[in-house]
Image: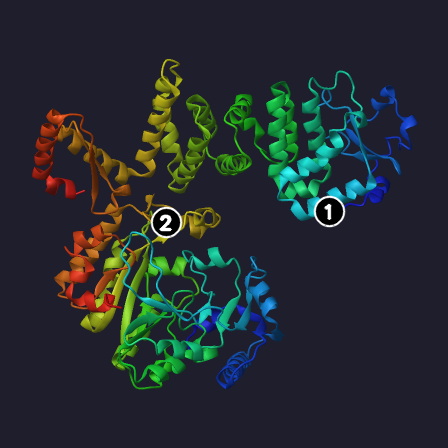
Amino acid sequence: MSKIFSKLPKIKNIYIEKGNYNNFQSNNIENIINNILKLKRNTNEKIKINYLENEEIINLTKQNKISQEDSYDLIIQKNPGIYIKKCPGTPNYICCNYHITTFYVNCNLGCTYCFLKFYLKNNNIIIYYDIDLFLEEINRFDRLRLGSGELSDSLLYDPFTNYSDIVMEYLENKPKITFEFKTKTDYIDPFLKRKPLSNIVVGFSVNPENISKILEPLSSTLNERLEAASILLKNGWKVSFHFDPIILTLGLDENEYLKLFNTIIDLAGNSIAWFSLGTLRYNIDMMEDLRKSYKGRILLKYETIKGLDGKIRYFIDDRLRIYRKIFDIYKNRNCTFPLYYCMESDKIYLKTFGKLPNKIDNLSNIFNFNC
Amino acid sequence: MILNFQKVELEKINKNFKPLIDFSAIDKDSLKEFHNSIFLNSKNDGYIPIVLSEDPFQCKSILKSLIVEYEVNTIKEIIEDIKLYNDDYYLIVKRFGKIILNKDSILLKDDFIEKYHSYQIFSLIFIMIFFKNTIDSKPSILLYLLFLLANENPKIIEQLKDIFKLYGFFEKIDFIPKDFYIYLISIDADRSLLLELKNLIDTIYSLPKSIEIIKYILICKLNKNRLRRLIFEIYRLVDLEKFDEFISIMKQDDEFFNDLKITNSQKEIRLSNIINKIINPSFSSRNESFNKLLNSLKLSLINIKPSLSFEKNEFSISANIKNQKELEILKDEIIKLAECKDKIFDF
């Protein structure tokens, strides 16, 4: 088991939403509780388990305060919406047409740049217990590229839920449905227990060590994540990488991204399933919160503009500079794996690739324009 | 907040003050003994003095005593309102207004204040101070009242400093010149802007020469929206550790900014340029190069604008023509433009 779990805050309460569970759901809830109690057996965590009505659960999820930094409440509830959604993207920027699904809401990793804490305002973790409905929903699609890393880390709570097993088992015979588990952990146990699947990708979101150790303090270290990726590759699994957010800031050498990009190419070469790049962007309201902490202020030490979507971004010349450097390495090392930008403008594509993603051979499939 | 008036009466009354039992106990002379106090005059319970402190305000010439008549039930309702709506200062003002607007219930010393309205607001301030918890959680309420007061009677602004100090709005009150309050009132600074300003001042106070920024705001007479944007820009200067650089560049331009013949809007443009170059150096330089290119093309009819912050690979072009001759000129300008398309799309 990854070392990361010993660093995380403790669970104080588990709240389970009362409901008319089907067999799958009641077994699932039971498994989650058993897994948690088993994992916490040798710790001094005293966890209270409570069953609550739907309204009480809603009130809990609407809390806008963090009661204790070192502990959190876990809420096991039904998904109030649908499971599979198209990535909302952002106006005026090019989206890769990824689909997102949510098994968990919120994350304990506490990365400084993460938008979750600014929107959710509490540190409760939600686990949806009715993922049988996700499996039903997925049947509506013939072809899809989706992932579960939008509102949480895909693998951080997997030891509680074993959802990766459930998903992989179901998708084993659906090769056109590509599922990405996006993570900042090195938790890869579920993948090592089974034969590799061609439609499953483990995505590692990484930043150079000098940034990661400051801004991603509870995540697995860069080396741990790279080591996990390497093990997966050796075992025949597909891996992807994400430099998102790329952070430019005073006093930190942006060339560290280039070194890391080279390291990843050395490690995985053209077997990388895809590699996405995106520079830091955030809602203007986040600035006030960022100013409150030393780490937050690090993120503000660079020229920014208000983008076409109203979010704060680095000025396009600065984004282009780092993208071009990465793209030059990509070209010079004859890479063929798909490389793309997350929520970037047409100009960025035109000034690096020389064309838009629908004209780039290895991206048209990834972007799945017909979907 | 729940306030028990009986408890206040028993525990908070200063022993130096005579408890007031009924209206007959008060006459104008005896009021002098009760500096800086508010008396709530309940018809049922007699007068309840609310002692603010021994001598909290140092504004002896302004405030002596204030007596507010109230109905017990009304006060209870108000307290309920504060508890429920303490985010809404209008409501609080309105509810207190019901009491204080009753002229007969307030005893005024003749020389107490020049305008009844000012006194009214001052009364509100004191009552707000009495409800200190509310003020602590929502300082903007008191701040708002203070500015109302200043608006009514600028002469007493000096004394406001003591109140500001006491309640920690601008702990660094010496930082702020009197004219600044007048300016804020003149631009009709709203509650949120005042709070933003307060937060900014708290943030930059420790920076050397931070007072200069107030000076430049006053010189340029920025309007409300521009002031709000300036607050954002100053935060960016601080984020980028460029505040000192900004002030020293501004100082080099002191002659320009102090020149009374130069209009406020010209000064504002200069201020914006200076700030932009510091907080958005890459963007400013790209903008300058783009404008240089446009100037070199000498287009008289065509306007070209890049996308916002040069984010997209597109430009908007517009032209107004008034006659056939201009149409011919436009044709030539379009040809000229097409000839340098590569240069334009380099941006």
Residue at 74% x, 44% y: name it. B79
**Residue B238 in sight in this render:** yes
- Viewed as shown, does residue A61 lie left or right of A259? right
For badge 2, the amino acid type reads: Lys
Q: Residue B155's spot in the image, x, y percent? A: 62, 18
Residue density around tag 2, few if under 14, some if 14–19, many if 20 or more, within 10 Å: some
Q: Which residue is mark 1?
A: B80
Q: Which of the image's four quarters has the C terminus of chain A?
A: bottom left
Find numbered disc 1 in the image and state the secondary structure of the residue it sits on: helix
In which image quadrant can residue A56 be found?
A: bottom right
Can residue B58 be seen by looking at this rendering?
no
- Element type at mark 2: loop
Q: Mark 2 sits on what residue? A: A311
Q: Please report contact status of discs 2 and 1: CB closer than 8 Å, yes or no.
A: no
Q: Is residue A249 left or right of residue B18?
A: left
Label 2 vs label 1: CA separation? Answer: 41 Å
- Which residue extends farthest top? B261
Chain assignment, label 2: A
Q: Is residue B275 above or below residue A112?
A: above
Residue at mark 1: chain: B
Q: Nearer the viewer, mark 2 or mark 1?
A: 1
On the image, the x and y values in percent for residue B300 come to 16, 27
